[in-house]
Amino acid sequence: MRLKNIIRVLVVALFTNTAISQEGLPIYTDYLTDNYYLIHPSMAGAANCAKV
């Protein structure tokens, strides 16, 4: 009975960690696709024209 409770606690802890870790903003969302400097710093000045 004690081992069953330990396994339940471990399973709940693993699923809680997975649910919390998915809240971050992915790096290739629409917010970041226009600004290549945020993705890779060496891309600064790679555009043909200046963006306003």
Image (cartoon, grey):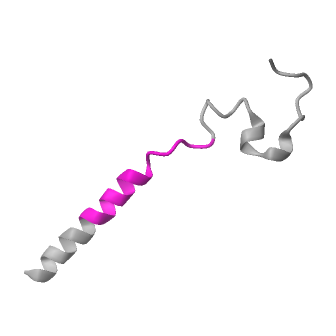
State whether residue 2 is above or below residue 46.
below
Residue 17 on image: x %, y %: 36, 59
Q: Where does residue 46 sit, x and y in percent of width and height?
A: 89, 35
- Residue extent of the magenta highlight: 12-27
Give left or right: position of 45 versus 6.
right
Tell whether position 14 is magenta. yes
In percent of width and height, residue 52 lies at 80, 17
Instruction: Please tell me whether residue 50 is drawn above or below residue 31 in the rendered image.
Output: above
Q: Main secondary structure of the magenta part?
A: helix
Percent coordinates x, y for residue 12 in the rendering: 24, 63
Residue found 61% across the figure and 30% down from its top: 30
Judged left or right of residue 6, residue 21 is right
48 relative position to 7: left or right: right
Q: Residue at x 74, y 32 (%)?
A: 35
The N terminus - image quarter: bottom left
Residue 3 part of the magenta-drawn span? no
Residue 52 in the image: above or below residue 30: above
In the rendered image, the residue lying farthest to the front is: 52
Name the residue at 85% across, 46% down. Answer: 42
**From the viewer's perspective, is residue 36 above or below residue 1?**
above
Residue visible at 44% across and 45% down in the picture: 23
> Could you say which is closer to the camera, residue 22 or residue 50?
50
